[in-house]
């Protein structure tokens, strides 16, 4: 998606703005709420679609971040934003996770694709948003920008 009016937000920036509360559903359609992020932990939310040709290119880096920082409090989660009914989107998310042998879970937005994506200012795919335990956006940008993303993760975890 592109920003309304064509205005461009800075890419790969630390924002500090509040994400407010948001809810995602796992592939069995069970809810996960952003207000359950434990203190001192981070969630890296990666927005993608199953048809995005660039999205699989960032998977190795996301898997590496999950492996390297998971024990320190980082939780990587994918959000599949395909324009499908919720149940079909959840099935597609499960397939995506299996197809790419992910070491992190893939979620979907409840009811209609796009609500959480739009709330977090996602402009294109793939797009990552690093969220702190108080719901604040600590960084957002292209997950392929590994140096900036990892620096934000380290800073957020106090490493």
Image (cartoon, rainbow, N blue to C red):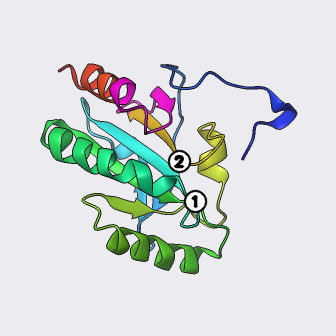
**Is residue 14 positioned above or below 33 on the image?**
above
Identify the residue at image location x=50%, y=76%. Answer: 92
Where residue 32 appears, x then y in whole percent?
Answer: 40, 57
Task: Work out which quarter of the rendered image holds the C terminus and state it.
Answer: top left
Q: Secondary structure at mark 2?
A: loop
Q: Inspect this view and state whether residue 74 appears.
A: yes
Contact between labelled residues 1 and 2, with CB atoms less than 8 Å apart = yes
Which residue is denoted by mark 2 in the rendering?
126
Q: Secondary structure at mark 1?
A: loop
Identify the residue at image location x=66%, y=40%. Answer: 123
**Is residue 102 positioned above or below 43 on the image?**
below
Numbered circle sitting on residue 141: none
Q: Inspect this view and state whether residue 28 appears.
A: no
Identify the residue at image location x=34%, y=33%. Answer: 133
* 33 relative position to 20: left or right: left
- The residue nearer to you, when weighing 83 against 29, is 83
Write the start and end of the magenta stretch as one range.
132-149
Find out whether residue 133 is within the magenta segment.
Answer: yes
Where residue 130 appears, x then y in whole percent?
Answer: 41, 34
Find out whether residue 112 is within the magenta segment.
Answer: no
Pointer 1 local density, CA inside 10 Å: few below 14, some 14–19, many at least 20: few
Pointer 2 local density, CA inside 10 Å: few below 14, some 14–19, many at least 20: many
Which residue is denoted by mark 1 in the rendering?
52
Where residue 106 appears, x then y in whole percent?
Answer: 40, 62
- The residue nearer to you, when weighing 91 against 96, is 96
Outermost residue toward the right?
5
* 6 relative position to 65: left or right: right
């Amino acid at each position: 998606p592109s920003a309304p009016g064509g205005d461009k937000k800075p890419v790969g920036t630390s924002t500090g703005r509040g994400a407010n509360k948001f809810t995602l559903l796992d592939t069995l359609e069970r809810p996960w709420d952003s207000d359950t992020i434990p203190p001192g932990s981070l969630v890296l939310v990666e927005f993608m679609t199953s048809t995005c040709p660039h999205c699989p290119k960032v998977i190795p880096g996301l898997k590496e971040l999950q492996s390297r920082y998971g024990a320190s409090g980082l939780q990587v989660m994918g959000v599949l934003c395909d324009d499908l009914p919720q149940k079909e989107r959840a099935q597609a998310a499960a397939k995506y996770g299996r197809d790419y042998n992910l070491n992190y879970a893939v979620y979907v937005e409840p009811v209609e694709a796009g609500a959480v994506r739009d709330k977090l200012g996602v402009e294109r795919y793939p797009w990552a948003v690093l969220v702190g335990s108080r719901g604040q956006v600590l960084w957002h940008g292209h997950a392929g920008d590994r140096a900036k993303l990892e620096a934000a993760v380290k800073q957020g975890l106090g490493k």
